[in-house]
C-alpha cells in the first residue's frame, strides 16, 4: 500500500509541475502577443501623426500662398 501512495504522489507532483510549466509558457506567449500588438498600435499612431503633420503643412502652405497674393512680402535681409 505504501508503494501505491508514493506512486500517486509522484504522479500528482509530475502532473502539477507539467501543468505549471505549461501555464507559464502560455502566459509568456500571451504577454508577447500583447506587447507586439502595442508595437503595431504605436506604429499606426506614428503614421497617423505624420499624415496629420503633412496635412497641416499643406494647409499652412495654402494659407501662405493666399496671404502672399493679398499682401506684399519682403525677404529678410541676410
Image (cartoon, helix red, strand yellow):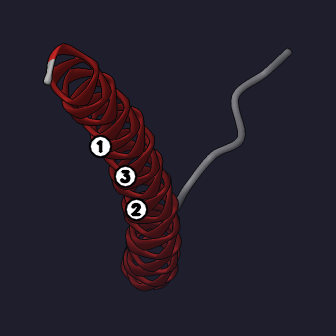
Tag 1 residue: 19
Q: Are marks 3 and 2 in contact (CB under 8 Å)?
A: yes
In the image, which disc is placed on residue 27? none
Quarter of the view holding residue 27:
top left
Which one is earlier in the sequence, the residue at label 1 or at label 3?
1
Find residue 8 and report its horizontal and vertical position in percent.
21, 33
Mark positioned earlier in the residue sequence (1 or 2): 1
* Residues at marks 3 and 2, CA–CA distance in whole angstroms: 4 Å
Please report the residue visible at 37 percent of the width from the left and 52 percent of the height from the top: 38
> Mark 3 Cα within 10 Å, few/some/many (few <14, many 20+)?
few
Q: Work out whether 26 lies above or below 4.
A: below
Q: Which residue is mark 2?
A: 37
Picture layout, residue 72 above or below residue 54:
above
In x, y percent, where is residue 73? 55, 55
Image quadrant where residue 20 sits: top left
Instruction: Identify which residue, 53 or 32, lies in the foreground.
Output: 32
Q: Quadrant of the C terminus?
A: top right
Residue at horizontal 51 percent and vertical 80 percent from the top:
65
> Where is 6 relative to 51, above or below?
above
The residue to which callout 3 is attached is 38
Relative placement, left or right, of 54 versus 15 is right
Question: Tag 2, which secondary structure?
Answer: helix
> Callout 1: few (<14), some (14-19), or many (20+) C-alpha neighbours within 10 Å?
few
How would you rate the neighbour count of disc 2 (Cα within 10 Å): few for under 14, some for 14-19, many for 20 or more? few
Amino acid at each position: 500500500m505504501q508503494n501505491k501512495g508514493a506512486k500517486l504522489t509522484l504522479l500528482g507532483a509530475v502532473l502539477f509541475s507539467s501543468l505549471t510549466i505549461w501555464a507559464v509558457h502560455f502566459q509568456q506567449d500571451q504577454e508577447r502577443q500583447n506587447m507586439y500588438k502595442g508595437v503595431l498600435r504605436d506604429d499606426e499612431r506614428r503614421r497617423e501623426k505624420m499624415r496629420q503633420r503633412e496635412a497641416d503643412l499643406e494647409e499652412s502652405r495654402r494659407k501662405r500662398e493666399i496671404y502672399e497674393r493679398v499682401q506684399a512680402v519682403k525677404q529678410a535681409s541676410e
